[in-house]
Image: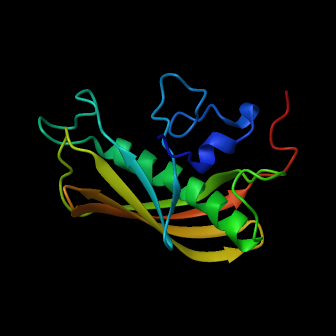
């Protein structure tokens, strides 16, 4: 059975993100969900996500941290308001700041696990810390400042 991530509940018009949009057929379609007090997401890089042979391109790592950070922010917002994930109105966040530290080369061809911790929830702002693991080894970490979008964010 597939676990639904918070991204599965984003409104259709906000579901095209290259990293986490369920409606972007070319994107990563990352899914973030709770695992105890942490958030988790998983992604297996493809051979074309290469920086140098055998290792993942750093931009991919940054985008995974980015999208898991905004997904974690949405999860935290639901939790902060004691609401079920997916209840109306939906929460959707965008990145205000992204900091990434590369700790070790990340091998390609293995599933990456992203773990998130919620550092702060204050109004429309959520700060998360995201850790990237490959084969149980932390290879990168990042801090994401995410801001909840307002209803006038998208103008057609």
Q: Position of residue 55 (x, y in %)?
A: 17, 42
Which image quadrant is residue 24 in?
top right
Indicate whether 59 appears above or below 126.
above
Q: Quadrant of the C terminus?
A: top right
Q: Nearer the viewer, residue 153 or 110?
A: 110
Q: Residue at x 72, y 60 (%)?
A: 84
Q: Position of residue 88 (x, y in %)?
A: 83, 51
In this rendering, would 62 be left or right of 4? left
Q: Position of residue 127 (x, y in %)?
A: 58, 70
Indicate whether 10 appears above or below 27.
below
Q: Nearer the viewer, residue 74 or 156?
A: 74
Q: Residue at x 58, y 32 (%)?
A: 22
Q: Residue at x 78, y 72 (%)?
A: 123
Q: Nearer the viewer, residue 71 or 98?
A: 71
Indicate whether 107 appears above or below 13.
below
Q: How many marks?
A: 0
């Amino acid at each position: 059975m597939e676990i639904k991530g918070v991204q599965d509940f984003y409104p259709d018009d906000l579901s095209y993100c290259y990293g986490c949009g369920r409606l972007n057929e070319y994107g990563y379609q990352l899914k973030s969900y709770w695992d105890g007090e942490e958030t988790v997401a998983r992604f297996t890089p493809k051979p074309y996500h290469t920086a140098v042979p055998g290792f993942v391109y750093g931009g991919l790592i940054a985008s995974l941290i980015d999208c898991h950070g905004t997904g974690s922010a949405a999860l935290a917002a639901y939790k902060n308001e004691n609401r079920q994930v997916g209840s109306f109105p939906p929460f959707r966040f965008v990145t205000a700041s992204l900091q990434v530290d590369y700790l070790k080369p990340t091998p390609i061809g293995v599933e990456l696990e992203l773990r998130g911790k919620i550092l702060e929830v204050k109004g429309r702002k959520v700060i998360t810390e995201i850790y990237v693991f490959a084969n149980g080894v932390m290879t990168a970490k990042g801090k994401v400042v995410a801001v909840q979008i307002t209803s006038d964010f998208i103008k057609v």
